[in-house]
Image: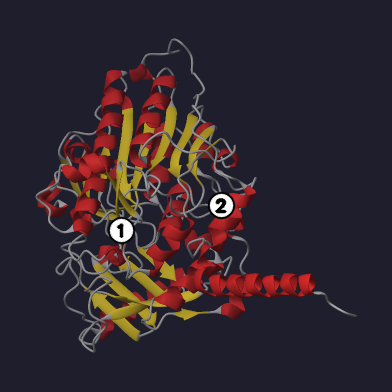
Amino acid sequence: MKIGKRGLVVIAGLVVVVAVGTILFSRYWYYLPGILQELRDPVQPNREVTWEQGPEEPAVPVAERAPNIVVILADDLGFNDLSFGGGGIAGVPTPNIDSIAKNGVTFVNGYSGNATCAPSRAAIMTGRYATRFGFEFTPAPPQFAETIATFADNGAVYFEEREKDAPPVDEMSVPLDEIYISKMLKEQGYQTLMLGKWHLGGTDTTRPETRGFDEALGFMPGASLFLPKNDPNVVNSVQDFDPIDKFLWANLPFAVQFNGGDRFEPSEYMTDYLTNEAVEAIQANRNRPFFMYLSYNAVHTPLQALKSDYDALSHIEDHTLRTYAAMIVALDRGVGKVLDELKAQGLDENTIVIFTSDNGGANYVGLPDINEPYRGWKATFFEGGIHVPFFMQWPSRIEAGTRSERIAAHVDIFATAAAAAGAALPQDRVYDGIDLMRYVDGAGVVDRPLFFRSGHYRTLIKGGWKLQVAERPEKAWLFHLAQDPTEQKNLAEKNPEKLGEMMAVLEEIDGEQAPPIWPSLVEAPMMIDRPLGGAPRGPEDEYVYWAN
């Protein structure tokens, strides 16, 4: 067959297109999830959200009805990011968040459900260790894991052979037979509201409005832009050394959904948008009991601040630190607006407000002091990864300025809410949480352990002691937290008797957990005492491999 001149030109053109496409894909393959999502569900212009209006008049006075319950969850907030207790990153005050502690109880030893976000959220939703039902790893597409292994340059390993056993990221969720706090409270007559980050599934059976929430406004994946990258009102801090940052900038939209509808752009900076919508939701539900889960994505990367907040912190010279601090300013402003609205509606006295973070501050923002005085980061079980701010106010029941040294944990939020709402815990499953009002009321001491697991890496806290064991590196860390709360002295070799005792309890609890629903696709080393972006790991640096 003879090919004419024009045919040769067409073929040559196709070859060039394929070659260029191959080169671009080989260089920018990690953009694929965001491109596919935009093709499936393109982001629409902003639209107004209308919250369902409750009754015009309350059926009973506020003081006589079940308390409203508001859980405010920050994302990747470092223990040292708040000014309460003398902290405050770069000297930036957080008076509104601090006020929850001052007007209620500070749980000095507050712990997250896990050292990464989604398993912690699963623990909050269910009142159980997420490993009890196999929700062990944070939902993420394979390209995310592969990006970390490809660009980290620190010994991270990607397990390509496990991809076949990993479901699509939207299907990575808590089993449907687990009871969410939203469903439990809805059955008690509460209007249930969710705003912000979900990260517990994105299918028709795993989304918030199908898991007990009457109304849900937010985004299903684990992160979102706070504003478009080129918005004139935004200041961006790109962490070139961080492979996670590379993936997020490539794929995240600036978008939310309302009750499972199309994605659309928020009308303003994400933190302020979620805040102002929460205020509207409080107004709509002022005359009936409601549960609000306000799940901010601040201060999770990508680091984006409002220019007005950034400009107000001109005393901070470091650009990354200034951007990060400005994000905390917006978060604190948002919490203040929510608290002010509760008071304006006459609801504050009989509303339980809990503030905490899903885990500790992340090493990949490159800031060294965000978890002081603790060692470690998000994605480690050192205190910097799991010891989080934990405040609760309920003015009609809790005396202002109360402090509790007892362990409080994310798994306790479910049991606390159930008791306040008059709901009995189901008897067909183990609950790892307790009603925190027992500590406040002095109704008895509960010496319960806390257990954490991510792949080969496991941790137990019990009776003032803490044991961490890992296979990579093969090591045990034993700390007497009651005397050494910042984990400076590893007593594993010096106290073999206590090591054996703790190990036996750890193995017993570990044996009660379920296998992971999906496999980890990547393992990456985390230095305990230095953030990402500095010098490479040296022989003196302690580290642990984190599986996800």
- Write down the quadrant of residue 346 in the picture: top left
Kindly report which numbered mark, 1 or 2, lies closer to the viewer in this rendering: 2
Q: Residues within 10 Å of mark 1 (few under 14, many from 20)?
A: few
Q: Is residue 464 visible?
A: yes
Q: Amino acid at mark 1?
A: Asp
Direction right: furthest residue: 1
Residue 422 lies, in percent from the top left, at 44, 32
Q: Amino acid at mark 2?
A: Gly
Q: Measured along the vertical axis of the image, is residue 475 above or below residue 354?
A: below
Direction top: furthest residue: 57
Mark 1 → mark 2, Cα distance in angstroms: 34 Å
- Write down the quadrant of residue 343 in the picture: top left
Q: Earlier in the sequence, mark 1 or mark 2?
A: 2
The circle drawn on residue 201 is 2
Task: Decide if residue 254 is on the left or right side of residue 177.
Answer: left
Q: Measured along the vertical axis of the image, is residue 30 above or below residue 62?
A: below
Pick the residue in front: 53 or 328. 328
Residue at 9% in and 50% down: 315
Residue at 37% in and 51% down: 410
Residue at 45% in and 77% down: 149
Q: Residues within 10 Å of mark 2 (few under 14, many from 20)?
A: many
Query: Which quadrant is home to the N terminus?
Result: bottom right
Residue 336 lies, in percent from the top left, at 25, 33
Residue 86 lies, in percent from the top left, at 9, 51
> Residue tagged by mark 1?
447
Task: Decide if residue 71 is on the left or right side of residue 178.
Answer: left
The secondary structure type at the circle numbered 1 is loop
Task: Decide if residue 244 is on the left or right side of residue 186.
Answer: left
Q: Measured along the vertical axis of the image, is residue 10 above or below residue 153?
A: above
The circle drawn on residue 288 is none
Pick the residue in front: 157 or 211. 157
Q: Is residue 462 visible?
A: no
